Image (cartoon, rainbow, N blue to C red):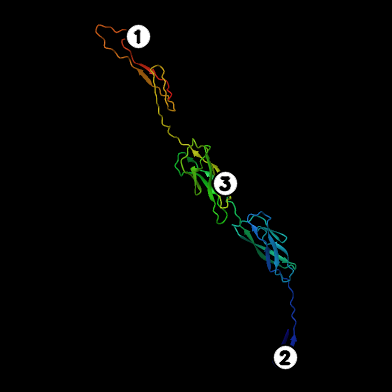
Amino acid sequence: MSVHATDDSGLRVDANLTIVVGVVNEPPRELELVGEGVVENAPAGTVVGSLVAAGDPEGDGAVGFALVDPNAGFALMGDTLVTTAPLDHEAAAEREVALRVRDAGGAEVVLTVVVQVRDRNEPPDALTLSAVPFAESGAAGSEVARIVGGADPDSGDVARLEIWSLVAGGRDASAAVAVEGQRIITTRPFDSETEAAPMLTVAVVDRSGLERVARVALVLLPVNEAPVALTATNLTVTRASTATTRSAGPCQTSDRRALAEPSPPRRRRRSGSRRPPNSSCGGASSCSTTATTMPSATC
């Protein structure tokens, strides 16, 4: 470089100057993650990609990497980035990882790479059923169970609830219940005598066919009911000390009734005649009424 100086009288002097620029080691300016990212829910230790530093003015490249936050869900194996826990795409589709990069001259810089967390179809969340006691002979629409869980974690995917089976009294009664929101309701009355111990199986299924299944024993409460109508036919009663009653009805009765045997009708006495002794009345002039007690009758 040439410079000159001039005073007030116009005198001038010229000189050549040499500027020496010192070399300062600079760290790399770029950091690249080479790889396709990681699929969500992959196990710990899954390889994410390899780290490559670029843009080092001295051209000596990076010789070391270190995580700024060792609890960010990643770890280093040399220049390879791996996971330390499963990642969730729905929680974050991308993860930024800050690393400290050091070159051969000891210069350091913090650079960031972005990890892509790829989505995959997941089954619905766990499904739980809780029984709600209901009375037999109740109207359709009675609640018999409540549903908890079963949501689909995948964005935009909606799982559907299905009645897989309902076994009651050893028979299939699946048509007797239906899904209404997060409830299971009846579509008809139940009978505790013929549909005892109902066992319900419900599934939640996503659009890809992945499913969760839950089972619960329903609580069917018996209700005191009036007896079935009784019809008695062919009733026969004898005047002896015992009587036989026959009936087509399906029950028994313990009622005891007294049947009165009437005295024989009196005949008008003719004048001048005597009535012979009544042998059945022990010679008495008239017979008294005799009561015969009926034993228990069977219908």
- Residue drawn at x 73%, y 64% is 64
Residue 213 badge: 3
Q: Position of residue 27 (x, y in %)?
A: 71, 69
Binning the other alpha carbons within 10 Å of mark 3 as few (below 14), some (14 to 19) or many (20 upward) gives some
Alpha carbon of mark 1 to alpha carbon of mark 3: how far? 89 Å
Q: Classify 81 as above or below 282.
A: below
Work out which quarter of the rendered image holds the C terminus and state it. Answer: top left
**Given the image, on which type of amino acid does mark 1 rest?**
Ser
Q: Which residue is mark 2?
A: 12
Binning the other alpha carbons within 10 Å of mark 2 as few (below 14), some (14 to 19) or many (20 upward) gives few
Work out which quarter of the rendered image holds the N terminus and state it. Answer: bottom right
Looking at the image, is mark 1 or mark 2 nearer the viewer? 1
Quadrant of the rendered image containing residue 137: top left
Alpha carbon of mark 1 to alpha carbon of mark 2: how far? 186 Å
Q: Which residue is mark 1?
A: 279
- Residue drawn at x 68%, y 63% is 33
Nearer-N-terminus badge (3/2): 2
SS of the residue under disc 3: strand
Nearer-N-terminus badge (1/3): 3
Residue 51 can be seen, yes or no: yes
**Given the image, on which type of amino acid does mark 2 rest?**
Arg
Residue 198 can be seen, yes or no: no
- Residue drawn at x 71%, y 88% is 5
**Given the image, on which type of amino acid does mark 3 rest?**
Val
SS of the residue under disc 1: helix
Alpha carbon of mark 3 to alpha carbon of mark 2: how far? 100 Å
